[in-house]
Image: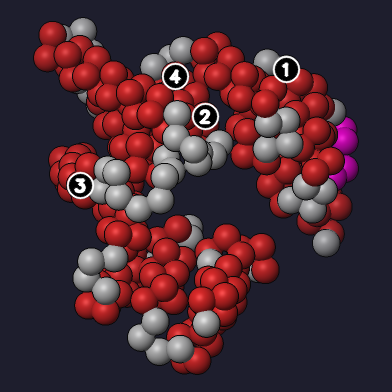
Amino acid sequence: YSSDDQALKRMISSSSLRDLTINLDERRSLLNVADRAMPNNTFIIQQQAILEMNSRDGDLDKAEELLDLAFDLSPHDISLMHTKATLLARRADSADDPLRAKTLRAKSREILKSLRGQGRDGSYVQTSLAKLAVKDIEQIVKSNEDLSTPIVKRDLLRLVEEAEREFNQAENSTIHGPTVTTERARLRRILKEHKKSIVIIEEALKDNPDSRRLAVAYNDAVKDDDLLLGRAAIKTALISHPNDKRLNQALFYSLIAENDNFSDEMSSSLHKG
């Protein structure tokens, strides 16, 4: 029955459900149906948790409850540890207290470091560790601290080196996606190195011109300076992904940004709809 199990996992994975519908309640319902059909299935419960923590209007408390239930069923499951680390990072993102956010990221980092070398050969651990470092850097840059003081400069340098080290390891793994590039570029933007950020995405686009995420990231990076350049990247990716929502949305906003009259006309049509 391993083939049936793999088919089920493909059907109810978070990415597959996102392709089916963008409505959160509908995706919840689909997973609830799967849960009733196969109760106490660790993978289904994990997907329910992932849905909550990765959705804009998801419930992080519910995600934690579901993840605890999954751990009760499979306490040594490495993929659940991955999900736990991600949940802690999500909680850090939503924390109002900077100290609490930093503490949650430290807990996430501790779990991820314990997972090195375990599971499939991929860049999840390295990319996640790099993202945590980038978040710490962003928090320091946005704080009221004097960035020129020796202690703050030392912390920033350590975190930048940590992020770059993890990015390099992620790129050297056999499995890695555009997240490595987009996060690396985001780091350079945080450090006020806008041109370096653009170059990073440009180089990646040369190898993957049909990448949806890279095209959107590149358009976001250059649209204020060169609207047509960003639009060209979007159009290239649309050839392979003509129905992609984010690409079409980016193209739409690029078109209406080019002409104020056109923008007013399109906005008026939207209101009428």
Q: Amino acid at mark 2?
A: Thr
**Residue under pointer 3:** 114
Q: Are there few (<14), some (14-19), or many (20+) residues within 10 Å of tag 2?
A: many
**Residue under pointer 4:** 188
Q: Which mark is residue 255?
A: none
Q: CA distance from mark 4 to mark 1?
A: 19 Å
* Left/right of residue 155 with respect to residue 203 in the rendered view: left
**Mark toward the viewer: 1 or 3:** 3
Front one among 219 and 165: 165
Majority SS type along the magenta span: helix
Which residue is outermost to the left? 151
Q: Position of residue 17 (x, y in %)?
A: 60, 68
**Mark toward the viewer: 3 or 4:** 3
Q: Amino acid at mark 4?
A: Arg
Q: How is the image coloured?
A: secondary structure
Q: Earlier in the sequence, mark 2 or mark 1?
A: 2
**Residue under pointer 1:** 226
**Residue under pointer 2:** 181
